[in-house]
Amino acid sequence: MQIESPAFKENARIALHDVDLQKALGNLKAGFPTKRAAAIERMPEFDSLRDEAMQLKNHIIENLDLYLEQFEENVTKQGGHVHWARTSDDACKTILDICRQVGAKTVTKGKSMVSEEVNLNEYLEANGVTPVETDLGEYILQLRGDHPSHIIAPAIHLNLEDVTEAFHEHHGRPRSSDPAVLMQEAREMLREKFVAADVGITGANFCVAETGSTIIVTNEGNGDLTQTLPKTHIVITSIEKVVPTLEDMTLFQRLLARSATGQEFTVYNTLSTGPRRADDQDGPENFHVVLVDNGRSEMVGSEFQDMLRCIRCSACMNHCPVYGSVGGHSYGWVYPGPMGSVLTPKMIGIEKAGLLPNASTFCGKCESVCPVRIPLPKLMRHWREDEFSKHLSPKAARWGLGGWAFFAKRPSLYRLLSKGANRALRLMAGKKGRVTKLPLAGGWTDWRDMPAPSGKTFMEQYKQQQR
């Protein structure tokens, strides 16, 4: 996936005027947040579970090396293999080597954002191995030559008409606008791919240290078919996904589905523990886990360590007013929304992703819905400070902040100017009670009116209240 994060402003401008995209995003706003709220209403202990999960994640991160070593040891005991990938290139080379060892020409894939992160599909195709996405959303995107715009609902930016056209073009069947017909069509097209695949590649929601198991949490049966039918199963995941025990894993499962889609539990929760044993009815002959770092180990002990708690539920983006207005593709890389605004600068550099942590209203909704209580606004503010300290922010922004700092250091002058600005804005609003156009603030008033101030500064109102 090409990096387009530096073009966020232009991407967002286009997205705001894209009628089809706005229609699709309307479905998001009416869906996941409402279902999440209803699911949590039925679970009085939800907030206490969030506290418990946050504390457990902090413990895991502080002891990450120990749990990863325990996980590797137990995978090996079960007959599997663990591969350590420091970079995206390391991960891709490792998976290609495994495919070549078994003579694979075709691989089926379950949904994996880490595989998107490392550009796995493009790498395999360039080296003669054909990847086939089997998650319905990912399959649709692959037909269209597109990329995910959401971490759990990859094709959420599309409408039914888009799917109809993609299936008609690539399957050669009559157009249908019936979702049931389209789903059956996808099943029929993918069934032969499942059977013929030499290798199956999945992600992992969690890696269990005490058993050497990985788990995928899905709502489609494609993940099970991907990891049980081929002779070789490869799991690609990131190092922070490890949890100490199966019991710990269930704690996160109770939070994950409710936070993501508002379900009590996802339809499929599939554990894989090594290759097939002699008395197993099915399963792969070979089991490999590729653990991807990609800068995550550098986050341990840094101001961004809290981000490693993320369990990829998407609640932050589902509730984010910016994501809900411009969609995931505007962010220009794999991870969109608030979590992407923190993670992406670490992955590709603040020089390329500096616009993302600034693409936030700082309303705090993302933090308030996060199941592991990640302080996302605080982490985005860290990136803003880093960008400013490296002189990467626009000159106009730097001059503006410099001017504000000059007056803020001189309280008397600041209050005088505040009083004057307050009165001036009140006069500009007139009888309408709002300012429709404001110099130097067109980015705000082009899209919304600014409520007129009261005519009194905060300090004046405070003193009046005190009296």
Image (cartoon, rainbow, N blue to C red):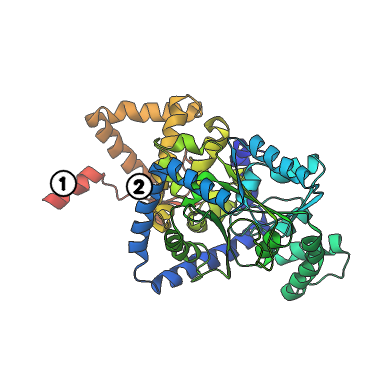
Q: Nearer the viewer, residue 169 or 274?
A: 274
Instruction: Classify residue 207 as left or right of residue 56.
Output: right
Q: Give the image location of residue 6, x and y in percent.
A: 60, 35
Q: Quadrant of residue 222?
A: bottom right
What residue is shown at x 73% (from left), y 62% (from top)? 229
What residue is shown at x 43% (from left), y 38% (from top)? 300
Sequence-earlier tag: 1 or 2 = 2
Instruction: Classify residue 34 as left or right of residue 168.
Output: left
Circle 1 Cα neighbour tier, 10 Å, few/some/many (<14 / 14–19 / ≥20): few
Visible in this render: residue 338?
Answer: no
Mark sitting on residue 354:
none
Mark sitting on residue 463:
1
Visible in this render: residue 49?
Answer: yes
Where is 269 relative to 204, above or below?
below
Circle 2 Cα neighbour tier, 10 Å, few/some/many (<14 / 14–19 / ≥20): many
What residue is shown at x 72% (from left), y 73% (from top)? 179
Q: Amino acid at mark 2?
A: Arg
Residue located farthest toward the right when viewing the structure as drawn: 172
Where is 408 relative to 214, above or below?
above
Element on which disc 2 rests:
helix
Question: For the N terminus, which image quadrant?
Answer: top right
Q: Nearer the viewer, mark 1 or mark 2?
A: 1
Instruction: Classify residue 83 as left or right of residue 66.
Output: right
Which residue position is annotated with label 2? 426
Where is 267 relative to 358, above or below?
below
Q: Give the image location of residue 464, x and y in percent.
A: 16, 50
Q: Amino acid at mark 1?
A: Lys
